[in-house]
Every structure is written in structure tokens, then in C-alpha cells.
Image: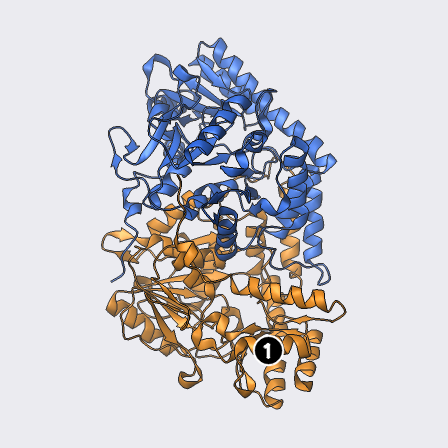
Chain colours: A blue, B orange
Amino acid sequence: MFKINDNYQKLPGSYLFSTIAKKVAAYTQANPKKDIIRLGIGDVTQPLAPAVINAMHKAVDEMADAATFRGYAPDLGYEFLRNAIAEHDYKARGCDIEPGEIFVSDGAKSDSANIQEIFAQDNKIAVCDPVYPVYVDSNVMSGRTGTYDAVSGTWSDVVYMPCTMENQFAPEFPKETPDIIYLCLPNNPTGTTITKSQLQEWVDYANKVGAVIIYDGAYEAYISEGDVAHSIYECEGARTCAIELKSFSKNAGFTGVRLGYTVVPKDLKCGEASLHGMWARRHGTKFNGAPYIVQRAGEAVYSPEGKAQLKEQVAYYMKNASAIKSGLQEAGYTVFGGVNAPYIWLKTPDKMTSWDFFDYLLEQANVVGTPGSGFGPSGEGYFRLTAFGSYENTLKALERIRKV
Amino acid sequence: MFKINDNYQKLPGSYLFSTIAKKVAAYTQANPKKDIIRLGIGDVTQPLAPAVINAMHKAVDEMADAATFRGYAPDLGYEFLRNAIAEHDYKARGCDIEPGEIFVSDGAKSDSANIQEIFAQDNKIAVCDPVYPVYVDSNVMSGRTGTYDAVSGTWSDVVYMPCTMENQFAPEFPKETPDIIYLCLPNNPTGTTITKSQLQEWVDYANKVGAVIIYDGAYEAYISEGDVAHSIYECEGARTCAIELKSFSKNAGFTGVRLGYTVVPKDLKCGEASLHGMWARRHGTKFNGAPYIVQRAGEAVYSPEGKAQLKEQVAYYMKNASAIKSGLQEAGYTVFGGVNAPYIWLKTPDKMTSWDFFDYLLEQANVVGTPGSGFGPSGEGYFRLTAFGSYENTLKALERIRKV
């Protein structure tokens, strides 16, 4: 008789955003006339940039003609896209990353969930707390996290690095030495980040203790301050300890287009084993490339028109972030983030729990946000709002929140 | 110090098609003027059908307007696509599969590699020999296959079901009872298949011994004979033992578009645990949906125009298959497949090994095929040609083969 992967049984409840979706659906069914504003899940609302649209139409036309039709893509992704990434995201920033170290994928979520596969099961992972749930859940599914304690909401074999008001949301070196360190900077969910010199300390630490940093840079496009690194490879020594994940979802609105990439430097080794070679093997065996049309769309993101149009789109969302931040502050809330990231992280009022505040906001203001405790125990008492709504809805939501 | 997943080190050499690509590249570099015809990898050459192209242009336009823009897709895929699949691929064939049991993905390769994750590590897999390498390699990466014996080319903990001339390429129930049985029918690489009543025997066997069948139906559109099942759910009892994988790559030319789906019936359980629930959790945690544009392209495959256009496309490739089959037979080759599948499986002449015949064909006829031994030890002495070239190239390749 076949047996299942028991690790799945350990996962507590359902995925955070599925729970939110169910709660909202139940409320909407009971109150069909209410106008709900969703500032919960980090999904974009602005249409794709004209440069991207044009590139996709052109690519679709190529697929209609046998002479220009494209079948299976190269394993690592098309050269035109890898070259554009290497040029604009790395060379232009003085980072030593070549196109052959870039793996094009269907998005940073898949990569951030799959990357753990190339590591041994008994590696110890360290995560920030609060944290994007996928890092932990994908390790739970692989049996790397030990047992779950429902009271504390933590796993016995995971090293947690609390990020709270008390340490300005900057993770500190853990007491127990980890093997794999997940860092998402600028951070989801707190909307905060650390300086380049703080990041350099993490790179030095990883090289010293022999750890790998999985660096999720999905929100890089939102960095507005000068002393923040746009890539971990701006730090000295990152080529021997860091894997970087990037997304096109937030800088170019590709949440429904699906494109991302992962950088595995050829200098990243465990003894003789090259992690680059392992990820290449994983990619070649378990994945078949992002669609040609989507890779052309990605290339257009780096064109002069694309860059100009997307700069405006990012500015649009950051105007929302700024409005939420100042609006909430005026209403007496304690608020973080929103300067280098499209997320606002607020302290719940009157010591409400995160889920109580979720229900309160949904019922009283018909605004959907994300409970901080859904991202980890240190997220309790916090709440996330995103800047990805329309400007009109964002202002409307703020007005409602201020009234309740 | 971090450690790697040692199972990767066990993988012998590189992925079959990467090896072929390297050999062809080396030959091309040494002989730049030679005109190579590729009948090796199963990649299509005909452009996308007009109905599909129109649907993609329309979807791209929707992404250009905030009112119709689509962000993250629903976890299981858009309802419009799941409904079309359920209607045309299942209900129309009398199969009891509902839209909620269908998981839309970025292709059958990913699903066939990832599906093993929801099973325990100590399950024993059974595969046909020869076999599509992804089934075995993905299990090697998960540590489920024991040790590799380079002499026999087999894994100690894998149950092999030889499919050769001697048994008409139909797998037989293995002596050792497996937990997970991979069946690809119509078969890649042999191009052969079994009857519906033979498939029913496999379903009965799986239910009796408590095994799961992973049924890869990627080549279903090429079935031309009446007594062959188009879905395993045509067989009684399949809902309690079978997972079905389907691809849009071969029936609609989506190799560079990337779309597939997996059916996990809600009746498929291990004790109280629902495999449907587990795959849903895996999908929700590690994947973020196929692109909206691609899902609309998939919907168009089921439109009246799309169906008519793709029937012609399949007929075009099957005309190639027929030409290869009769041409090789006339030239004195022993040939199989090509009736219900776009693959021709030939016996190498003069007891040549598969790789010797590969080199011989590449050098003498400048035709690229796939060595049978690359698919498993029982593939030794066989060779695969695909019908996915253009008709002109197919005839040209045949003429060259006949001359050498």
C-alpha cells in the first residue's frame, strides 16, 4: 500500500492567504452589498506597461508563423533575457554576475519554495520572524523543521530571528548557528529594510560560519534610500555564500504573467559540489522554462520605454504607501515601512490581536489587510496593509479606517 | 557548514536531451556546412493555431487595461479553463471528473517531476523500461531509488517493467509489488500503447495491491484506434487509484507556451488523508499559477475553431509518422509505434548499440534521433524518431536514411 509524505500532515491549518480569502468570502456572502477594499494580499492592480504589452503582441505573432515559432526554451532561459538581466540588474550596479549564472523561472514564489531541495535534509534553516510563509512551509514539506508547537507557533528545528519595534525590524545573528538563512530585503511583511553595511555584516557572517543566504529581493524596485543595496552581490564576498531570488511581479506588475529569476554564482560550493550545477540539474529535470511570450515581456521591462513606464508605476504605488503611512500616523497609529517597500506595517491599537484587528477592520471599515501573526509569532500585534491598490481605493480605505 | 542534497550526486551524467544537444553542437561546430535535420527531441514545429493566437492577443489586451487586468490566478487555475477541460476531456467521454479535481499547471513535465513529493520516501516506484527519464530522475533526487548500478543502468530500489518486441511493448505486472506505478500511454518513447481492457487490468491491479498509478496522457490526441482509452478515468475504479497528467504541448503545440494539468480525484485516499488536499496544498505553497494569457490560450484549444484547427495539426504530424513508418519498413527496418503516437521506435540494424546508431545517423545522414538506451536498459538496440518535424524535412530525412 502506498504511503503519503507525512510532513504534510504537520502543516498547521491552511495557507495564510487562503484563510483570508475564505473569511472575506464568508463576510461578502453575509453582507452582499458591502463594498470591500482589499489591501491584504500583495497583488498589483495597475495594468501592464505599454512596452510590455507591445512586446507580448509581437511575440504572440511570432508564434503564429512557422518561421519564427518557438518551442521548448533553453533550460536556463533565453539569452536575450539573461543578457538584459545581467546588464541592467548587475553590471550597471557593479555586481559581478554573468548571464550563465541566471536561471529564468516562472516566479520567485516557485523558486523560493524549490530552492531548499538542493540542500541536505538535516540543514538548519533560520528565518526572520515575521516571515513570508513559503520559506518555512516548503521546508516543513521536506521534513526539515522538526515538530510544531501550536502554543508558541514555532517549529522545533527552525531558528527564528525576531524582527520587532525593539530592534527596528533588523534581524540579529542567532545564538544557534544556522546552515541556511532566508533574508527578504526590503522586507515582506514589515516593509522595512537594512542598510548596505548591515547586509555586508550578514555576508561576512555567512562566509564565516559556512551558511548559505537565500536572498529574496522581490521588492528591490521600491528602494528609495541611497544606503540600501539593490542586490546582495553589491556586498563583498556574496558570490561564495548567497543565492538571490528576483521577481517581475512587483516592479512590473507580473503577478498574473509569472516571471522571476534566481542567481546561483559559480563560486558557491560545498566542497567540490557546485550549487550552480545542482540547480541547473533541478531546473533541467523538473521545469521546462517560462513561456517565450513571457520572456519577451520580461526583456521589455529593461527597454528604455519599459524602464520609464515602470518607474512611473512604482511611483504610483509608493504614493499610496506614503498616503497610508501619513494618514495612519495622523489617525494615531504607530506605523512602519512604506519607504523602501510597498508595505505598511502597523501596530494594532489597544493591544488587539492581529486577527481581532483583521475582523474589526473587515467588519467596521470593510477593508481587508493581513494579520501580522499569520507571518509568525513576532508578527502578533501587527498588521500589514499594501500599497498595491488604486489610489482612489487607498484614500477611501484610509478615510474609513480613520472614521472607525 | 551547510550540506547539499547528496542524492543529486547519484544521478549518472546529464539529462539525456542535454547530452544529445552537446553531441549535435560539437558535430555542427566541426561541420558547419552540414544541414542537420532534428527528429530527436519531441518538440513541435508547426505554429500555434489561429484560434489560440486570437485568444492570446485578446488576453494581452485585457492586461493593458486596469478594468480587465488580472493579477494572481486562483490556486487551481481559472474556472473558465477547468470547466472547459472537465467538459471536453472528461464529461464528453463519460468520465466522472469535476472541475474542482483539475489542477492547472505550467506543463506536464513539472507535474510529473513534482507529484512524487506528496508520497513517503520509502514508497517503491515501478516504471516501464524504456521510460521518460523525468519519472526516475525526480525520484532519484528525492532519495527514493537506492543505488545505481552503472553496468546494468538500473537503480536498486526501482521496479522495472521491460517493454520490448517480445511483449509487444506492453508492461506486465511486476513480481515485486510497487506502491507507485508510472504509466505513459500512448507511450513515450516507444510510440506504442495498450487497449482499454488492458488498461482496466492495471486499474484493477492497482486497486487490489493498494498502489497509485501516475498516468501520463500527454500523447492522447494522437490516438487513432477505437479500443484505446483517452483517459484512465474511462476505466472502472480509476478514481480510487489514479492521478492523470495532461499536457497541451503535443495536442496544441504549447511546448514554448507551457500549460498542462493534473487530475487528482477526491476519492483517492491513503487512510483519511486526501491526496487531492495534499496536492492542493503543494500547489498553493510552491506554485503561483499558469499565466492568465496562457490559460486563455488553453481555453481556445477547446473552442470549435480551435478543435478543428488542432485536428488538422495532429493529422499533419501523423502523416509524418506514417511516412517515417512505411519509409523505414521499405528500407528494411523493423519499426514500431506511429499509429497512436507521434513516435517511431525502430530496431537498430546489425545489432548496433543505440548510441552507435545515433552517431552513425548523425554523421552519415545528418539526422538527429534519440538513442533508445537513453530511456532505460531495455531501450538498448532501439532508436526513437519523432513525427514533429515539417513534412518536407521528414521526407528529406527519410531519403537520407534510406541512402546510407
Up the image or down, B144 lies above or below A381; here it is below
Residue at x-position 49% and y-position 47%: A275
Up the image or down, B85 lies above or below A347; here it is below
**Callout 1: helix, strand or loop?**
helix
Q: Quadrant of the rendered structure where residue B313 is? A: bottom right
Most foreground residue, B291 or B311: B291
Farthest right residue in view: B33
Q: Quadrant of the rendered structure where residue B162 is? A: bottom left
Q: Quadrant of the rendered structure where residue B32 is? A: bottom right
Circle 1 chain: B
- What residue did someone put label 1 on? B321
The quarter of the picture where the N terminus of chain B appears is top left
In x, y percent, where is residue A181? 42, 34
Most foreground residue, A39 or B329: B329
Most foreground residue, A380 or B315: A380
Q: Is residue A354 visible?
A: yes
In x, y percent, where is residue B226? 47, 79
In x, y percent, where is residue A355? 34, 25
Count of labels shown?
1
In x, y percent, where is residue A289? 56, 52
Residue A148 horizontal side relative to residue A125, left or right: left
Give the residue type that dot 1 points to: Ala
The quarter of the picture where the C terminus of chain B appears is bottom right
Residue at x-position 51% and y-position 62%: B15
Label 1 Cα neighbours within 10 Å, binned few <14 / some 14-19 / many ≥20: many
Residue at x-position 38% and y-position 17%: A348
Residue A67 horizontal side relative to residue B101, left or right: right
Residue B366 horizontal side relative to residue A135, left or right: right
Residue at x-position 58% and y-position 79%: B357
Q: Is residue B98 visible?
A: no
